[in-house]
Image (cartoon, rainbow, N blue to C red):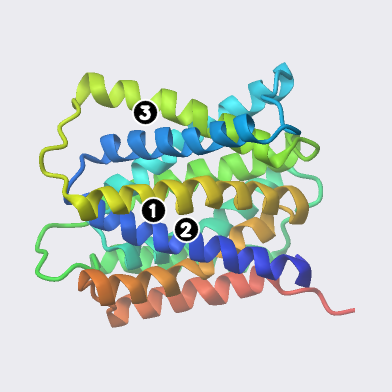
C-alpha cells in the first residue's frame, strides 16, 4: 500500500460509511431485498446514463469482461442484501465495526490465491486478533441499538456472509481483472446485481412501498448514487491500482463515519464493548499492514 492510495481510501470509506447510515434508516420502511433491488436499479441507470452521454465510452462487448464481471455482480447481490438485512438486528455503527474484520479475511484468501500477497507469522497474528475482536462483540451480544432485547446473532451471521462474499470478489478482481476498465466492470457488476435481486424480490416479497415516505426515498437515492454508483467505482479502482490489501483499508474509515452519524442521526449507541472490539481489530490490522524493517 502506498501514500498515493490514501485519498482514495478516505473517499471510499466516507462513501460507504454514509451509505450504511442511509441503509440503516431505510430498513424501517423497505423490505431489505426490495431496498437493495431498487438501489441496484437506480445505480444501473446512472451507469447507463454515462454510456449514453459520453461519446468516448461504449457499452462493453468483450465476453471475457462480461464473464468475470457477472460473477462479481452475483457476489455483490448476495453481500449487499446480506448487510442490509443484518441492519434489522444491528446498528450501522456496529455493522461497520464488524466489517473492519474484512481485511483479515481478505488477506487469508489472498494468501491462497495471489502470489503477491504472502501470509507471514506477523500477518497470521493480526488475523487472529482481528477475528478475535469480532468474536468478542458476538459473545457480548452487542447490537448498538437502543432498547433492543432480541439477540443480534442472525445479524452477525449476515455480516460474516457479507465479509466472505466481499473478500472473495476482491481477491477475484485482483487475480483476473487487473487490466480491465474499472468503470466497465462496475457497470456490468451493477447491471447483474440488479437483475439478480430485483426480480427475485418482486417474485417472493412483492413491491409494497406504502410505508415509504419522502425521507425514505431520499435515503434510497443517496445510497444508490453515493454508496453504490460512486462507491463501487472507487472500490474497483482501488483494488485494481493499489492491491487487495489497500482496497480493504476504507473499512477503517467507515466505523468513524457510520458510528458518529448513526449516533447523531439515528440515536444509535456506541458502547464500551464496541470500542474494545474495534481496538482488537485495529491492532490486528496494524500487524497485518506493518512493513518488515530492513
> In the picture provided, is 293 more to the left or to the right than 92?
right
Badge 1 density bin: few <14, some 14–19, many ≥20, Cα 10 Å? some
> Label 3 to label 2, Cα distance in Å?
20 Å
Quarter of the rendering containing residue 180:
top right
Tell us which disc is closer to us: 3 or 1: 1
Residue at the spot 20% in from the left edge and 43% down from the top edge: 30
In the image, residue 281 above or below residue 218: below
Residue 222 is labelled as: 1
Badge 3 density bin: few <14, some 14–19, many ≥20, Cα 10 Å? many
Tell us which disc is closer to us: 1 or 2: 1
Quarter of the rendering containing residue 9:
bottom right
The reply to whether dot 3 and dot 1 touch (C-beta < 8 Å) is: no
The residue that label 2 is drawn on is 16
Q: Secondary structure at mark 1?
A: helix
Q: Residue furthest bottom?
A: 272
Q: Earlier in the sequence, mark 1 or mark 2?
A: 2
The residue that label 3 is drawn on is 197
Amino acid at each position: 500500500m502506498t501514500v498515493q492510495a490514501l485519498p482514495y481510501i478516505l473517499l471510499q470509506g466516507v462513501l460507504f460509511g454514509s451509505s450504511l447510515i442511509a441503509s440503516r434508516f431505510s430498513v424501517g420502511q423497505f423490505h431489505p431485498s426490495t431496498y437493495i433491488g431498487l438501489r441496484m436499479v437506480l445505480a444501473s441507470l446512472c451507469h447507463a446514463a454515462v454510456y449514453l452521454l459520453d461519446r468516448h465510452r461504449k457499452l462493453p462487448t468483450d465476453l471475457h469482461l462480461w464473464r468475470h464481471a457477472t460473477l462479481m455482480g452475483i457476489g455483490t447481490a448476495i453481500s449487499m442484501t446480506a448487510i442490509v438485512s443484518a441492519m434489522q438486528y444491528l446498528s450501522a455503527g456496529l455493522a461497520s465495526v464488524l466489517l473492519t474484520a474484512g481485511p483479515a479475511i481478505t488477506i487469508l484468501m489472498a494468501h491462497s490465491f495471489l502470489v503477491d500477497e504472502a501470509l507471514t507469522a506477523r500477518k497470521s497474528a493480526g488475523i487472529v486478533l482481528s477475528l478475535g475482536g469480532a468474536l468478542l462483540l458476538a459473545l457480548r451480544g452487542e447490537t448498538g441499538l437502543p432498547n433492543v432485547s432480541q439477540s443480534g446473532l442472525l445479524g452477525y451471521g449476515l455480516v460474516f456472509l457479507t465479509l466472505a462474499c466481499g473478500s472473495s470478489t476482491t481477491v477475484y478482481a485482483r487475480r483476473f481483472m487487473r487490466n480491465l476498465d474499472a468503470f466497465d466492470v462496475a457497470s456490468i457488476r451493477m447491471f447483474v446485481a440488479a437483475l439478480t435481486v430485483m426480480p427475485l424480490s418482486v417474485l417472493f416479497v412483492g413491491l409494497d412501498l406504502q410505508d415509504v415516505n419522502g425521507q425514505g426515498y431520499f435515503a434510497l437515492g443517496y445510497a444508490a448514487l453515493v454508496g453504490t454508483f460512486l462507491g463501487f467505482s472507487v472500490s474497483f479502482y482501488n483494488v485494481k491500482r493499489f492491491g487487495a490489501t489497500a482496497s480493504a483499508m476504507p473499512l477503517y474509515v467507515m466505523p468513524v463515519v457510520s458510528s458518529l452519524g448513526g449516533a447523531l442521526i439515528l440515536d444509535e449507541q456506541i458502547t464500551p464493548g464496541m470500542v474494545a472490539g474495534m481496538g482488537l481489530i485495529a491492532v490486528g490490522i496494524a500487524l497485518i499492514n506493518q512493513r518488515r524493517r530492513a
